[in-house]
Amino acid sequence: MLKFTRRHMLTGLLAATTAFGFAAVPGFADDRNSVKIGYAVSKSGANATGAGITTIPNYKLWIKGVNASGGLELPDGTRLLIEVVEYDDRSQTEEVVRAIQRLATKDKVDLILPPWGTGFNLAIAPLMDKFDYPHLAVTAVTDKAPEFAKRWDKSFWFLGGGSDYAEALADVLGASRDAGKINNKVAMISVADGFGIDLVNAARPALEEKGFELAYDVSYPLGTSDFAAIVNDAQSSGADSFVAFSYPPGTFGVTKQAQVAGYNPKVFYTGVGGAFPVFKKISGGQQEGVMGIGGVQSGSEAIQEYFANHTDVIGNPPDSWASAVTYTSLQILQEAIRRVGLDREAIAEEIASGEFETIMGKVSLENNQLRSLWWAGQWQGATFAAIAPADSNGAVAPVIPKPAWR
């Protein structure tokens, strides 16, 4: 159990100050020499890989950039440095809930940034509403986003719903089958977590509507490390398309097992982690043709500049899905504060109604949701390029079949 002692908090602040390259902060937020921003994120446990690639680096990148420019700008032109209170939720739901309560009631931070993952964002949403904080639910995929946005009117949902990704995948597979590139069977696995459940519940009807047969359809517990039986069963199904709605440990594990087993479906699609830069290493440099959730507009100058800056400051490139969205959400928050100040109600209203210049271009939310997203991508050369929606500017054509593992 975490013990949130004053000493621990100060130790954390010192570590954060050093790691983020902050200038010395002469006081706490009460004297308005700084803006206190808190978050709880998975620095250990099963979610640490995802949080360590998508969420934490972008928090560091944004905070370092803001403080290097003098701090968050307020409507009167004054600037306040960001002071950080950070907790490790240890990939445990009860810990992230406990930490959010602590940030709101004990630390009394000005703003709270979200944790990583669909399940954790759903878990804290009622608390964020109770304590009156805007909730930028970035790494949360849920078809219930419209319902949640109405229930908690200061919650904002940035990554779409399972139906968006599933229907886009079904469109890609349907076009390939109609072109004679793949057969009519799909082998599908999903992690038994909010993310996997949302995706697979959307994928079943989307694939069946396209006329596909689900030759294999199983879920596995979060934390599964042995995928031998699953891969063998998928291989025996006769499906040309393998789909995994997986989190990073599962994405990496099933990829390695497919290579060990010589399992070479014509379509190999993974969930979270497939667009991570480390996937190149995980796949032994055989990422070419692997499909997955997300994608980026690799030809965009703003995206290219973001990738270069991220690599320079963090030491490695971002992933090609939720990282850019995470950074975009922080740009929106920063601009909203510049326009309306630190009143949380006013910030939420501005995020809901404003238009913002971001690395993803001009962005405005629809009913508290970001809808201008890429739903599917594929490794083509050194880039995880966006392939769906196929009619969106910047999309590239998918390459099917995927080259066999060497």
Image: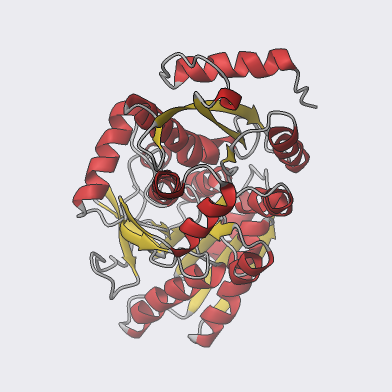
In this picture, residue 109 sits left or right of residue 314: right
Specify how the rendered protein is coloured: secondary structure
Which x, y percent locates residue 38? 59, 33
Which x, y percent locates residue 107? 69, 28
The residue drawn where x is 51% and y is 44% is 252
In this picture, residue 81 sits left or right of residue 257: left
State the residue in front, 276 or 286: 276
Which x, y percent locates residue 334? 42, 43
Q: Residue furthest front?
A: 76
Q: Visible in this render: residue 221?
A: no
Which x, y percent locates residue 232? 58, 57
Q: Residue furthest right?
A: 1
Q: Indicate whether 265 appears above or below 333.
A: below
Name which quarter of the figure residue 180 lies in: bottom left
Q: Visible in this render: residue 298?
A: yes
The residue drawn where x is 41% and y is 16% is 23
State the residue in front, 162 or 210: 162
The residue drawn where x is 28% and y is 71% is 392
Name which quarter of the figure residue 403 lies in: bottom left
The mark tally for this picture is 0
The residue drawn where x is 40% and y is 18% is 21
Image quadrant for the N terminus?
A: top right
State the residue in front, 161 or 64: 64
Q: Indicate whether 187 appears above or below 262.
A: below
In this picture, residue 162 sits left or right of residue 385: right
